[in-house]
Amino acid sequence: MIERVLIDSDVVLDVATGRIPFVGESKRVLAHMEERRALGLVSAHSVTTMFYILRKLGGSDKALEFLSGLLGIVSVATEGHNDIVQAFDSGFPDFEDALQHQCARSNGCGAIVTRNTDDYEKSRVPVYTPREYLAAFGTVE
């Protein structure tokens, strides 16, 4: 069993926006964390990104309500100066993905769950789609 899992913002936004056809599996990933079968983490920078997107879609109050509820299920992974420098030097083509990867590494995560697995080809942390994660560590309904 993986103890710590970094949840990429795309998975959380699937739930927040009800994005079909991804919302079901993404909800089950978050339910897995809510059941404390693993410690779910989101990066600090993802919280601000998600707030920005959700505020644009439904206003500040709804964004804050959703994210406050999310923080009852997952924890916020810390990021610092060294994480940013290492992300710059990682060779990832996309900086945000590099920072997610570095955040997962520095916070001891055994997995990253994202729908964009191709963006993590250079990852040293195992990367799963929600479906793959649920098949390996939870249940796929």
Image (cartoon, grey):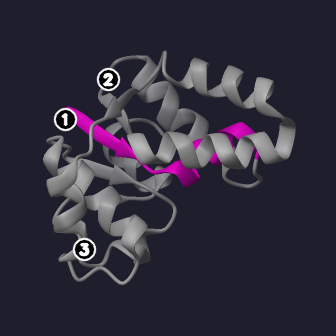
**Is 100 left, or right, of 3 in this rendering?**
right
- x and y, in percent, of residue 43 in the image: 38, 43
Between discs 3 and 1, the one toward the N terminus? 1
**Is 4 left, or right, of 17 in this rendering?**
left
Give the amino acid at mark 1.
Met
Q: Secondary structure at mark 3?
A: helix
Q: Which mark is residue 1?
A: 1
Q: Secondary structure at mark 2?
A: loop
Q: Secondary structure at mark 1?
A: loop
**Is 88 left, or right, of 61 in this rendering?**
left
Position of the C terminus by quadrant: top right
- x and y, in percent, of residue 27 in the image: 60, 35
Which range of residues does the magenta coloring cover?
A: 1-18
Q: Nearer the viewer, residue 54 or 11?
A: 54
Query: Does the image show residue 116?
Result: yes
Q: Which residue is mark 2?
A: 37
Q: Nearer the viewer, residue 69 or 30?
A: 69
Residue neighbourhood size for the residue with mark 3, other residues' Cα within 10 Å, grouped as few (<14), some (14–19), many (≥20): some
Residue at 77% x, 53% y: name it: 20
